[in-house]
Image (cartoon, grey):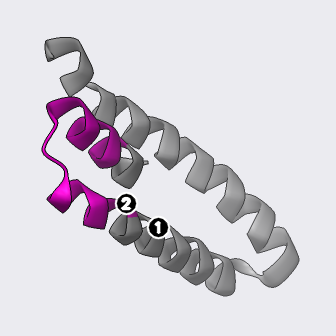
Amino acid sequence: MAVFASLPFIMGAIGNLAGGVFERQAAQKYGIKTSRRLVGSVCLALSAVCLFPNRSTTGKLTGIVFLAWASA
């Protein structure tokens, strides 16, 4: 389990990098103000969706997986 405990942090780092890439592409298309709002809103909504199943799971591994997806 110690190896899997680092998974949310690894996914968080990947999510930060991916968010930066998506924000840059959206900034070229929609403008910087709109792109920052769009990426932030979508990512926070997806994190909330991933946290709901985490509350009802009983397994350790499943909880870590849902938490990792919420961190990304």
Q: Nearer the viewer, residue 54 or 36?
A: 54
Q: Which residue is mark 2?
A: 50
Asked which quadrant contains residue 32, the reply is bottom right
Classify mark 2: residues with Cα within 10 Å, few (<14), some (14-19) or many (20+): some
Label 2, label 1: how many angstroms apart (C-alpha)? Answer: 6 Å
Splitting the image into 4 quarters, where does residue 44 fall? Answer: bottom left
**Residue type at mark 1?**
Leu
Going 55% across and 82% down the picture, which residue do you hit?
37
Residue 9 sits in which quadrant? top left
Q: Position of residue 53 (x, y in %)?
A: 29, 60
Give the extent of the magenta segment. 50-68
Residue found 50% across the figure and 79% down from its top: 41
Q: Which residue ends up furthest to the right in the rendered image?
A: 29
Image vertical order of residue 13 relative to residue 45, above or below: above
Give the numbered dot on residue 46: 1
Q: Which mark is residue 32?
A: none
Identify which residue is drawn at 42% across, 36% down: 11
Residue type beneath disc 2: Cys
Q: Residues within 10 Å of mark 1 (few under 14, many from 20)?
A: some
Task: Give the image location of residue 15, x and y in percent.
Answer: 49, 46
- SS for callout 1: helix
Closer to the camera, 9 or 29?
9
